Image (tube, rainbow, N blue to C red):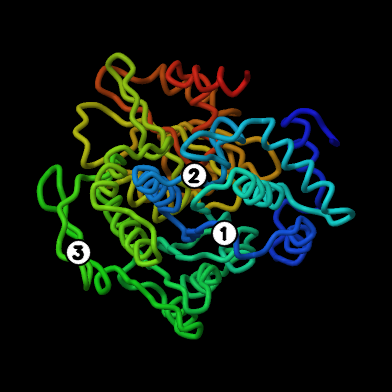
């Protein structure tokens, strides 16, 4: 084995390939073939692509499948506190030992083929799931779909969540171009669920070219809120069922949950036993960190949210306005260079009393002064300050708050991770991953 610890493997992988992002399936496909792997995996696969709602959809799908008694693997990215979160079985992250052993198998098979950090992770997920003989995997696409490493593997059901403008340098600058890339996860004559009622025509055209059945919100299935605690879901061949709200904050989660239920019914048609009680239990018990996660600290509220694009900011703004708050909202914001910080701040400007901009480390991180220049200074805004790190910005925000105020920490997984690491609520998780 090249390395004995997971941090050693990861540090090496970050520098192995000449670029961090290198879309395409040729190299990863060659390595998987050398590992005697087929693109159609020996277990069911649900692949989820989209701009917003992917993480929530993975969490709800896997929660329902586990409630139905299936041994379920999930592959997600990025992680919050520990790399192991990316590859989990029945909700439990795989151990360092399992991941290192898989990395060694990949390293041996690849020969002189160079792989990116994400490609290593994707192969490790498939390899570990195969070793552990899971029943079904729920795979989250990292970026796009057509050329993403996850798309090496054939999906039994594809789910495409709402599509917005993100990663435009790689995927295109219109919803139509981005949708075409997302549609790449669709397979011939294999069902695809669209959680949008009006997805871009390029997605529909691509599915039709493959004769893939399309299950679109508002046509194949419908949903609507009923009471403060319940909502209804029905499809063209299923009578309306009354369900509990998913245990994830935000009315927009109904859009994600409704699509997930359609996925589950398609899996039922393919022979899986997923009854209505498993759907109900899965929704009630779903857990996902960093999605409008509220933490009470004495008489203030800390809100953690990984939102980093315009569509996500719109959802976030609705949640902030819907939650009764007697005080001010202070924002700690740090983002990556390829994100549209101006669009995000414009949407939330009226809700924020003061912005604490922070820098993120690494080549992709944006410094606080750049965020300020793009968002505030030209608009003549003065309710902001710049800080070198997320923790410095967070600590300054805490100095401003009074009883009833809120501190919103958002803009990136990296932003949320930094604050999570200093909050007492997450110390047990940090301790367990370090052992």
Q: Which mark is residue 36?
A: none
Q: Nearer the viewer, mark 1 or mark 2?
A: 1
Labels 2 and 3 touching (C-beta < 8 A): no
Q: Earlier in the sequence, mark 1 or mark 2?
A: 1
Specify few, some or many for label 2: CA neighbours under 10 Å numbering under 14, 14-19, or 20 or more.
few
Labels 1 and 3 touching (C-beta < 8 A): no
Q: Which mark is residue 377?
A: 2
Quadrant the N terminus occupies: top right
Q: Earlier in the sequence, mark 2 or mark 3?
A: 3
User: Can residue 233 be seen here?
Assistant: yes
- Residue 418 shown left or right of residue 7 in the figure: left
Specify few, some or many for label 3: CA neighbours under 10 Å numbering under 14, 14-19, or 20 or more.
some
- Residue 386 shown left or right of residue 56 in the figure: right
Name the residue tied to disc 1: 167
Labels 1 and 2 touching (C-beta < 8 A): no
Name the residue tied to disc 3: 234
CA–CA distance in space, label 1 to label 2 = 25 Å
The residue at 15%/52% (across/down) is 242
The residue at 59%/31% (across/down) is 82
Query: Element under label 2?
Result: helix
Q: Position of residue 296 (x, y in %)?
A: 31, 21
The one of 128 and 407 positioned closer to us in this rendering: 128
Query: Element under label 3?
Result: strand
In the displayed image of the protein, which residue is found farthest to the right? 112
Q: Nearer the viewer, mark 1 or mark 3?
A: 3
Q: Position of residue 150 (x, y in %)?
A: 60, 58
Q: Nearer the viewer, mark 2 or mark 3?
A: 3
Query: Element under label 1?
Result: loop
Task: Residue 98: name its quadrant.
Answer: top right
Specify few, some or many for label 1: CA neighbours under 10 Å numbering under 14, 14-19, or 20 or more.
some
The residue at 40%/52% (across/down) is 57
Q: Position of residue 435 (x, y in %)?
A: 63, 18
């Amino acid at each position: 084995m090249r390395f004995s610890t997971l941090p050693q493997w990861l540090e090496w992988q970050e520098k192995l390939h000449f670029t961090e992002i290198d879309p395409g399936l040729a190299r990863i496909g060659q390595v998987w073939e050398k590992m005697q792997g087929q693109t159609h995996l020996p277990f069911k696969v649900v692949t989820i692509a989209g701009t917003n709602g992917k993480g929530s959809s993975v969490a709800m799908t896997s929660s329902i499948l586990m409630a139905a008694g299936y041994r379920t693997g999930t592959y997600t990215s990025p992680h919050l506190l520990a790399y192991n979160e990316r590859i989990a079985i029945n909700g439990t992250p795989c151990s360092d030992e399992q991941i290192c052993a898989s990395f060694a198998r990949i390293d041996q098979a690849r020969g002189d083929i160079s792989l990116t950090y994400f490609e290593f992770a994707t192969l490790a997920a498939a390899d570990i799931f195969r070793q552990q003989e899971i029943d079904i995997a729920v795979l989250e696409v990292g970026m796009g779909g057509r050329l993403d490493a996850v798309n090496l593997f054939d999906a039994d059901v594809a789910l495409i969540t709402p599509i917005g403008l993100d990663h435009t340098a790689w995927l295109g600058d219109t919803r139509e171009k981005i949708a075409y890339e997302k549609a790449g996860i669709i397979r011939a004559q294999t069902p695809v669920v669209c959680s949008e009622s009006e997805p871009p025509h390029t997605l529909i055209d691509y599915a039709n070219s493959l004769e893939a059945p399309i299950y679109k919100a508002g046509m194949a299935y419908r949903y609507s809120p009923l009471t403060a605690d319940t909502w209804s879901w029905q499809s063209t061949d299923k009578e309306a069922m009354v369900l509990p709200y998913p245990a994830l904050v935000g009315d927009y989660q109904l859009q994600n949950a409704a699509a997930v239920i359609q996925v589950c019914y398609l899996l039922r048609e393919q022979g899986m036993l997923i009854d209505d009680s498993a759907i109900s239990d899965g929704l009630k018990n779903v857990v996902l960190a960093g999605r409008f996660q509220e933490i009470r600290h004495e008489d203030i509220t800390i809100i953690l949210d990984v939102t980093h694009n315009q569509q996500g900011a719109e959802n976030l703004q609705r949640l902030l306005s819907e939650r009764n708050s007697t005080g001010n909202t202070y924002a700690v914001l740090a983002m990556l260079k390829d994100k549209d910080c101006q669009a995000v701040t414009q949407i939330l400007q009226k809700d924020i009393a003061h912005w604490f901009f922070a820098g993120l480390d690494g080549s992709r991180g944006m410094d606080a002064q750049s965020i300020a220049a793009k968002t505030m200074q030209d608009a003549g805004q003065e309710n902001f300050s710049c800080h070198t790190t997320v923790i410095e910005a967070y600590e300054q925000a805490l100095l401003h708050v009074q009883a009833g105020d809120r501190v919103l920490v958002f803009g990136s997984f990296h932003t949320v991770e930094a604050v999570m690491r200093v909050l007492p609520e997450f110390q047990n998780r940090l301790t367990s991953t370090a052992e």
